[in-house]
Structures are given as structure tokens and as C-alpha cells.
Image (cartoon, rainbow, N blue to C red):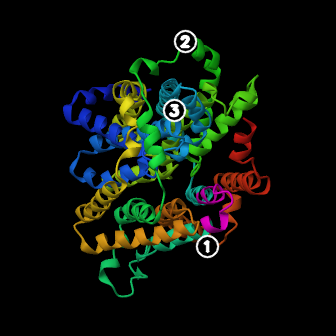
Amino acid sequence: MDFIFLVFSSFSLLADPINFTYVILGFVIGTIFAAIPGLTATLAMALLLPLTYSLSVETALMACASIYMAGMCGGSITATTINIPGAPSSMMTALDGYPMQLQGKGALALGHAALGSMFGGAVGALLLIALAPFVAELSLLVKTTGKFSLLAFALIVVVIAQRGRIPQAGLAACIGLMLATVGLDAMEPITRFTYGYSNLTAGIDLMPVIIGTFAIAEVLTQACARIDISAATEAANKVKIRRRDFLPPLAEIRQIGFRCYFKSCLIGYFVGTLPGAGGSMGSFLAYTEAVRTSSEPETFGKGNPKGIAASESANNAVCGGAMVPMLTFGIPGDPITAIMLGVLVINGIQPGPQLMADQAGLIAPMLAALLFSAVVLIPLTLWLIGPYFIKIVSVRKDVLYAVIALLAVVGSYVATFSTFQMFMALGMGVLAFYLRRNGFPVITMLLGYILGPNLEEFLRRSLALSNGDATTFFTNLDSLFFVVLTLVFVYFLVIRKPAKPSAVAGSG
């Protein structure tokens, strides 16, 4: 209860002009990056990560929270207007949003998307605020062996969640684990894989890995892509929207029903707590459930607002869910929370069971900003500048990506003041680019790099405490729980394969 009071008292920090400005700027930047096809809020946060060095911890985390929430709802703009999802989490929104656009109801579709995003973001944030302290207390029951099994479970789930690319995902995760071993040994004062190069003694810094994996690799990918967006630009320029057109009629909201909104929020929140699941899986499952329970399933995919509401409610609720494992265990739930974890670590905050007790004052403002972004900024932003967002797709890509490349390189240098780390960012970008071109999901490489040090440490500690007896992972109940949970996920995601999104789309 004290933590809940602390979060709501943190709303007073928004009265600070600096905090308020960064929250607003973060939301606008996150929305713009999510709306531009090819860009993501993850890229926006990676580019802005070096700025966190010059900000207070509270301000940096509040800005990150607003970018996160904006990134989830911003992708619905181009998904609806030109049928190009600005973010993976908006793929299901496009199934009904674009048909409504063709029917002349594009503004109404955006209004339903904003309403669903607001509802999902608010419920996800409130569940996070209410449940995070209890999850933190439960996490104290997980001992050394259980922590290894939990991290192994997280990494395995991230790999097998990449359906159809499990071998590539597994190899990418192994590359990330290998990168994490460079530098000083975790338990002994010796260096590993430095090859006598003193700059590698401290290992590969988190900053160049994040900037290289997302920003530089994205620039290289777009430079090689020959996509003609002239038709999309022309379509966007023809769209005329008035602000009053965004307001969904009360009758349609009642027809969608509170139950659909709330159920989609719960689906998105709990999917978000699974490492590597992300907003796309949450929106897919919520959309599938909406189709299953509808009395008119044949209307989905043809402009049914209920499909938009289910998808957007779920993918914004993911924000709150994905922060649970990140804050309590240091395990990112998706790429954006992986970067937010980097912000915490850079500022000397170590996520874990004691975080809510020892440094709750630093975390509470971030959760307050997350709730504020959902309830206030989502509807306000769409109302004020929504008609202009659909013009974003017409921005010249050569200028845009040149600026991104410059920011990425300069940011990687400013963050560490190391020329070596700047070139390391370039090297990581080239590596991630070739991995992406060959079908390797780079998110598994990043999570392998982030989880690698703790995974190794808990493995070696567990074996040291048991005198090398590997059965300790099966005789301790906390570890056995995660081993069994891993087998359950392997069964449902690999052996008994779930339906593909295309099957749902085809049913509409």
C-alpha cells in the first residue's frame, strides 16, 4: 500500500517543467517513430539513451516510460490510414483499421484505437503498480538455483517464441552469450577472450550493443531496401480528417463492450510478463479471442471496431506486464524494456527483489509517467495533432536515416567518450544487419548478451554450492518449478504448435 501511495504522490513531479517537458517530448518522439514504417519506439529509445547521462534518474525513466506507451499506440496511425503497420504490435489493428479507412471512417478507426490504447495502457499500469510489490516479495523465495533456472527459462522462451526461426534464434542467443563472456571473469580476476587487447578488458559496453543492434543495423537495412512508398505517400496526402471525427459514438463503445476491453487488457498484461512475447503476440491473442467470442465473426477483417479495440487494448497493456520481470528479476519482457533495463543499470540501479524496497522512490515516478501517458497523452495527442500524423510517411527517407546514423554514431561516442566503443557500435550494427538479413532475430542476441553474465554466475554458484552435482536444479523446489514451466512452454510452443496469425486474418 505504501508503494501505491508513493506512485500516486509522484504525479507531483510532473509539475516540474523539466520533467513535464521530457515526458511530452518523449511521447511525441515515440509516436512519430512508431508511426513511420521501418522505425520503431525501440529505435527512438536507443537513440535517446545517451541523453540519459545528462538527466536525473527520475527524469530519464519518466521519459522512457512515455516513449514506451507512445510506441505501442503510434503504430496504429499508419496501420489504419495506409495499411502499413508502424510497429509489429499494430499488425492486427490493420486488419480492421484499413477497411474502415477505405469506407471513409479512418478517423473513427483512429478514435477507437486511441480509446483502446488508453484503456489498455491504464489497466496495464494500474496492475503493474498494484502487483509489482507482491511479485517482488515472491521473488525473494527464489534462491540461487532457482534464479539460474528462471533465467534459462526466460532465454528458452524468447528463442522458441520465434516460431519458424527457432534454430536461427538459438544461434543468435548463443552469439549474445558469447559476447557477454568477453572481459573480466565474473568470479575470478582473469580476463577472457580479450586476445591481449586492453580495450576489451572491461568487456563490451551495453551502450554500443544497443545502439548498434537497433539504430545502425536499421539504417543499413533501410539503405539496402528498395521499397517504393510513393503510393503510400499519395494515399496519406489524400486523407482529410477533422478533429471531431475522432470521437467514437457511445453506441459503438457499448457494442464493443466493457468485457472485451477488460479481457483484452488482461490478455495483454499477462502476455507481457512472458519474456520475449511482446505486443504483437498480445494483440494477436486478444484479437483471436475477440473473433472467437463474437456473434458475428465474419465481420472481422472487414472493418469491425471491436477488432481494433481488442488489438490496441492488449498491446498497450503489454507495457505494464513487460515491466514486471524487468523490475523484479532484471529480465526484459521485450526490446524496449531491454533498453530501459540499460537505463537502470547505467544509473546504478540494479533490478531485483530488493528494488521495490530500497529504491522505490526512483521507480515510482516512472510508473506514474506510464499511467499519465496512457490516460492523458494518448487521447490528447490524437485530438491535437492526429490529423498531421498521417503525413509522417511522406518524410524523405534519405534525410531521415542520415540524421539517425549521425545521432547513433555521435551518441555512442558521447555515452562513453571512447573511440573504441564507437567503432564497437559500428561493428555490432554490421553484425546485427547481417543476422537480420539472414533471418536471425537480433532480439535473442541482445537478451542473450544481457542475461548472459547473471546466467553464468548463478550456474557456477549453484554448482559450487552442490559440489558439482547438477541434480541440484531438480531437487530444489524453486528451480524445479521453472524447469517444469520451461517444459510446458516447449510443449505448447514447439510440439503442439499454436495457430498462425494468417489463419485468423483469413477467417475475417
**Can residue 466 be found in the magenta stretch?**
no
- Amino acid on which disc 3 is placed: Gly
Disc 3 to disc 1: CB gap under 8 Å: no
Q: Mark 2 points at which residue?
A: 250
Residue at coordinates 64% horizontally, 21% vertically from top-left?
259
Foreground tag (2 vs 1): 2
Residue 222, located in which quarter of the rendered image? bottom left
Question: In the rendered view, does 23 fall on the left or right side of 505?
Answer: left
| Among numbered discs 2 and 1, the one appearing first in the sequence | 2
- Amino acid on which disc 2 is placed: Leu
Residue 351: % across, % down: 42, 50
Placement of 494 over or under 29, stated as above or below:
below
Placement of 17 over or under 406, stated as above or below:
above
| Among numbered discs 3 and 1, the one appearing first in the sequence | 3
Placement of 36 over or under 457, stated as above or below:
above
Can residue 351 be spotted in the picture? no
**Can residue 168 be found in the magenta stretch?**
yes
Q: Residue 124 carries which label?
A: 3
Disc 3 to disc 2: CB gap under 8 Å: no
| Among numbered discs 3 and 2, the one appearing first in the sequence | 3
Residue at coordinates 42% horizontally, 17% vertically from top-left?
244
Q: Is the magenta stretch mostly helix, strand or loop?
A: helix
Label 3 SS: helix
Can residue 188 be spotted in the picture? yes
Foreground tag (3 vs 1): 3
What residue range appears in magenta? 155-169
Q: 497 or 97: which is nearer to us?
A: 97
Residue 470: % across, % down: 67, 69
Q: Mark 1 points at which residue?
A: 467
